[in-house]
Amino acid sequence: MPIGTQNRFIQHKGFAMSIITISRGSYSYGKEVAEKVARRLGYECIARDVLIEASEEYDIPEIKLLRAMQYAPSFLDRFTPEKEKYVTYIQAAILRHLCKDNVVYHGLAGQFFVRGVSHVLKVRIIADLEDRVKLVMERDRVSNKDARRFLKKVDDQRRKWSQHLYGIDTSDPSLYDLVLHIRKITVDEAADIIAHTVAFPHFRATPESQCVIEDLALAAEVKSVLIDLSPDVEVTTHNGMAHVRARIATSAEMEMVQEIERVVREVPGVRGVRVEVLPSALYTG
């Protein structure tokens, strides 16, 4: 186990360390539930904050990051690295927060970024369409027809986004530990249910599960510094060792490998790096 992880468990001994991700459709009360859960538990609550953080750190306009998270790629986007680059930056920012544990994240993609981490409670908040339409009409002062059209567009975009990047439909209940329908169950009651559920022993961090999320976070950081240098790059890490897989033109292979190694070694937390050059008959640089 990394020394940092050992220290974290000594520091937090006796306290439940957990992560809660809340997925929700637009105007489905997910934000309200997340904020109430965070207040009840004394957890950090993050959502749009990570876009601002990523925007400042990577010098990318926030609106571009927002569009990358909200809108599914068009046919042409599939042939450009821009959208994947923005998602990589956001992923690094989100995982940086989630590594600290005792966090509630509400928004798109949270459950995807922490796959394989056992101390994550994955929640889906749903609401009746009529209630969602009413909320849109009240908040945005639009007609019933326009509200329905807006919700359909947003829901379709989010579904296509997750299917494009992860091959997953966010509305699939099997992706979640808990699905709560805000109707008979109120926002306050939903928050109480989540707060009660996350206290179960299997949602508490262990040294092993903490290592898993720290590896994910470090891999995301490494990829974020490499993606401009080598857009088609895959990164995994384990106990500070970074394994980079990249497609590199044969003519520049030696120089590119050396540059990748240099850049990766400068990432805090990296203890070593191994670069694997992937064969590609079509890739000539």
Image: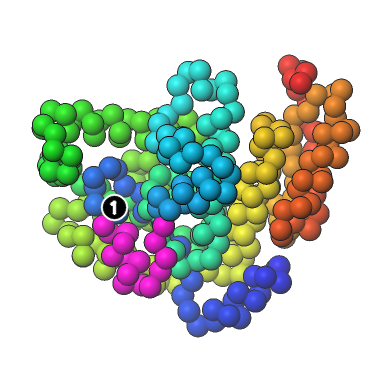
- Which contiguous range is marked in magenta? 32-46
x, y (%) of residue 16?
Answer: 46, 75
x, y (%) of residue 8?
Answer: 60, 74
Quadrant, the N terminus: bottom right
Query: Quick one: 129 or 249, which is closer to the camera?
Result: 249
Residue drawn 73% across and 16% down? Answer: 282
Choose top left, top right, bottom left or bottom right for residue 46: bottom left
Left or right of 133 on screen, residue 264 = right
Residue drawn 53% across and 22% down? Answer: 78
x, y (%) of residue 57?
Answer: 57, 49
Residue drawn 14% across and 34% down? Answer: 142
x, y (%) of residue 266?
Answer: 76, 52
Residue holding disc 1: 30
Left or right of 67 on screen, residue 143 = left
Q: How is the image coloured?
A: rainbow
Query: Quick one: 265 or 30, which is closer to the camera?
Result: 265
